Image (cartoon, grey):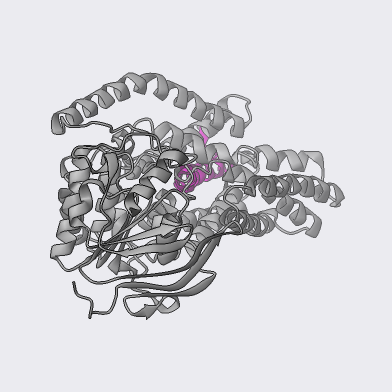
Amino acid sequence: MTILDFPFMQRALLAALLVGMAAPAVGVYLVQRRQAFMGDGIGHVALTGVGLGFLLSTSPVWTAVLTASVGAVLIELIRERNRVSGDVALSVLFYGGIAGGVMLINLAPEGSNANLQSYLFGSLTSVSPEDIRIITVLAVAVLAVTLGLRRALFTVCQDEDFARVTGLPVRALNLLLAVTAAVTVTVAMRVVGLLLVSALMVVPVAVAQQLSRTFSMTAALSIVVGVLVSVSGTALTYYVDAPPGATIVLLAIALFVLVGVLATPLNRRRARRAEAAAAEAGPTRVDDVHVDAEVPGAGTMAT
Amino acid sequence: MTRLQAPVARLIGGTASLGGRPVLRGVDLSVHPGEVVALLGANGSGKSTLVRTLVGLVPLTGGTIELFDTPFARFRDWSRIGYVPQRTTAAAGVPASVREVVTSGLLDGRRVLGPGRRGRAAVDEALAAVGMLDRASDGIAHLSGGQQQRVLIARALARRPDLLIMDEPMAGVDLRSQEVLAGTLRTQQEQGRAVLLVLHELGPLEPLIDRAVVLREGCVCHDGPPPRAVGQHALPGHDHVHPHDDHTAHRAGMGLLS
């Protein structure tokens, strides 16, 4: 018997493959606009949806998709209104999500701590054929949005002020990205669990951006890394008794460290070469790195 | 000067506030086709807010905006406007190449999916105009401040805009980038396109400026030919390298006005 002879392993590997693609595909945009924490927050809110599903005895995946989407839209609206002071409002939302989820699961007739565990940390081997159908549909939708609209999403996440002046529907794109992230979180929760979802969205991107200078290359590489760690991590749990979510995330982090160690001298050489090229092109560089005291707080676009 | 043509941008009695503090107190401003207009003033005079209001990034609390003879609320033709935001850093959280950033300038409300094949020529042209074509595949984070500024100008130029709006494009850039900026102003002028740019001081760009509008405390206090520079700012080869603390900013503002 090999690993692929078991239907439950087939389903687990397929789920891992889909999640490994979808999570970094969304994550790259969140990292691009420095919102790596967003997946974490949505994951917290989604727990309330899971609890709601238990309480109503319906599929927790659908209630989680709905709740996480509402939460993601709220997060986006808070971010849009208060670029500076939004973080307290966001934390309240995140804690509320976790607390609400734990409370609802406790109230549900068949709810138990074991159930809670499987959503918090993932439980790949219990993925049913019905789950696989939902995961496939949602993952395909996530990939369609993130790949199909990549130019517009890149423009908005690179420089939101500029994007607004291009006439792009910035708000609609932001809300679409938020809902897409929410769907991804829900899809990934069966594989890595709600508490580790964000890792699968962020760490592959962190690995990829050490090796790439362009956005498209970073996005493509991060999907490759996502698939690599989630499939190999899942396969590993067939041979070793280990929790799949934690295995996948630790593999990704190991890759991050490994690539970091290997890529640092490479990047240093590349930077030196770029500097040499710049010096050749313009020997008249005078006050190039002069910091302008007029711009308070680099990183904010506010004036 | 083509005063008889309708202005490409017009603000009438504009007021705006930031965080409850009034920043613009009834500003009139118009930019005509083929005109290069410099917006001057000390720190906090509202010049940056004024251009951000014109492009819709800061809401008006009073007054009206017309862009290309269309009331702001009905204006959809954003491809005619090229905007260069005040640069903090051109790099975001994920690496991006110079070409990718400039290509993002081709999108607008009608081209959400991307520019297609024809866009490549526009991007090459814009990159060549700012002398960055040979750096097209480099990562934006590896560029110097002046080079990043040139990339942001190229992103706006790729749209072939009838009105180019630049917020402090001279802040902390090297000599080569100042030349590129001057060339951009000249080309826009020759093509009968308009430029509105926020400057801290006129400096080497002075001969290219058709009109200067000076703001003080949210009001227009000068609108006409560029004011003569005096003091050390008028000396040839003067490089604006002193820190922009309130004291010197005030002095620069006074120099412009006298």
Q: Is A22 a magenta residue? A: yes
Q: Nearer the viewer, residue A110 or A121?
A: A121
Instruction: Examine the residues drawn in magenta and state their main secondary structure.
Output: helix
Q: Nearer the viewer, residue A99 or A279?
A: A279
Q: Is B75 a magenta residue? A: no
Q: Nearer the viewer, residue B36 or A162?
A: B36
Residue occupying the point 53% across, 28% down: A236
Residue occupying the point 69% across, 58% down: A63
Question: Residue B120, can we see it?
Answer: no
Quadrant assignment, res A220: top left
Question: Is B107 left, or right, of A203 in this rendering?
Answer: left
- Could you say where residue A207 lies in the image, as x and y percent from the top left? 43, 31
Q: Nearer the viewer, residue B224 or A222?
A: B224
- Could you say where residue A49 lies in the image, as x and y percent from the top left? 71, 54
Question: Residue B81, can we see it?
Answer: yes
- Could you say where residue A140 lies in the image, as x and y percent from the top left? 47, 56
Q: Is residue B218 above or below residue A298?
A: below
Can you name the residue that lies furthest to the front here? B258
Q: Is residue A87 above or below residue B73?
A: above
Residue span colored magenta: A3-31
Residue occupying the point 27% across, 79% down: B6
Quadrant assignment, res A99: top right
Question: Is B116 left, or right, of A115 in this rendering?
Answer: left
